[in-house]
Amino acid sequence: MKRKHLSSAAVVAVAVVAAGALAGPVEAAETTLFVAPGGSDSNAGTQQAPLATIQKAVSLVVAGGTIAVRGGTYALTTNIQITKSGTASAPITLTAYAGEKVVIDGEALPYTPGAVGSTIPAVQRGAVHMEASHWRISGLEIIRGPYGVYCANCNNNTFDRLVTRDNYETGFQLQNNSANNQIINLDSYHNRDPRKNGESADGLGIKEGGGSGNVVRGARLWNNVDDGFDAWAFTSPITVQDSIAYGNGYNRWSIPNFSGDGNGFKMGGSGGTGPAAAHSVTNSMAFGNAAHGFTDNGNTGSLVFHRNTAYQNAKTGFDVDGGSTSRLTANLAVGNKTAVALGSSTGSGNSWNIGGSWPLASTDQATITGPRNTDGSIRSSNFLVPANGQAVGAKI
């Protein structure tokens, strides 16, 4: 019988079903490669004869193809290098198969950690080191690497439901000329950098570069040694939505000469003088951080902060007096050392503009920091919602 060939769209659809919806075995589409513990890189990469390493699958996959990774721990001896790109009409997918738990462990890689004061060579940055475009990467847990995911000169990628934890630098870093990337439902926590005395490892960094159209949505960034989110020296607007950053900037690892910053959302800056970048943050929360909840950090641009909440941060809830001309509307600041430092920025409809007391419907974070919904979104609750019902602050 003559074999029928699927269109690229149909292949992608089959791959997505195989990777994310079915719990039982399926026949592999022509462009689906399987990786599994106990596989062999001399195998064909089918579900019945899977490959052993993600790197081998990356070397074989073609535009429009899918790499479906079976559950298990993949201990790396060399980091995963992704340098080939898909296309706009035929992106490449790398995903955990059928919701199985996939852990990529970089503990055995160089620079885990690097010596104090050392520099990590660019090619060694990241248990997953990526310089490619038009990928869809989802459902992976990346741990104990010299960075978790490090993506440079990356465009038009989607990263969904990743976990980057316990890495020896930033959990997920996007930099250089990188545009139109979506980072969705990321959990990034317990990342630290003894190499730089805690001054560098954030939950998520989009920094030291430029490129329009980058979006962060549904991220949870907590207990990282430096900042939750850091946009240091990124020159193009970044959109942050529906995200939370908490517990950042504390020395949980007894790092000597500790120099972690501890902001929830650090929105740019570079040595206190810029560059100007009009980032926006909406419906997001920063609580319990060692420094500011939200800060312009010397970004001289016109940032937008709308319907965000800063709660019990050790310094200022909204710190926008570093040279920016930010616009703050309908934000809530409760229990911080200082509610707001405006400088040349302006605001209206914020809790400090309205005045009075702001009791909260709930201060129990268990729901918002607990398991996610099946679609990867953060579970909704009344955490930090004003008890008076006013439309001020975030509601997640």
Image: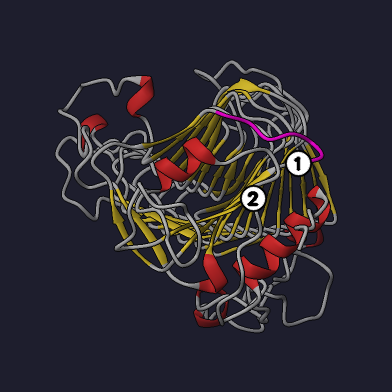
Q: Main secondary structure of the magenta part?
A: loop
> Label 1: few (<14), some or many (≥20) within 10 Å?
some
* Residue occupying image coordinates x 57% and y 22%: 233
Above or below, comparing residue 265 to residue 303 in the picture: below
> Label 2: few (<14), some or many (≥20) within 10 Å?
many
1 or 2: tag closer to the N-terminus: 2
- The residue that disc 2 covers is 31
> Quick check: is 104 in the magenta stretch?
no
Q: Nearer the viewer, residue 392 or 256?
A: 256
- Going by the numbered disc 2, the residue's amino acid type is Thr
Asked where in the image residue 161 lies, by quadrant, the reply is: bottom right
The x, y position of residue 59, in whole percent, is: 48, 36
Going by the image, does 269 lie left or right of 282?
left
* Residue occupying image coordinates x 83% and y 73%: 390
- The C terminus, quarter of image: bottom right
Asked where in the image residue 101 lies, by quadrant, the reply is: bottom left
* Segment colored magenta: 84-89
Could you say which disc has been placed on residue 111 in the image?
none
* Residue occupying image coordinates x 37% and y 23%: 123
Above or below, comparing residue 71 to residue 115 in the picture: below
The x, y position of residue 298, in whole percent, is: 59, 25
Above or below, comparing residue 383 to residue 16 in the picture: below
Above or below, comparing residue 123 to residue 60 in the picture: above
- Going by the numbered disc 1, the residue's amino acid type is Ala
- The residue that disc 1 covers is 90
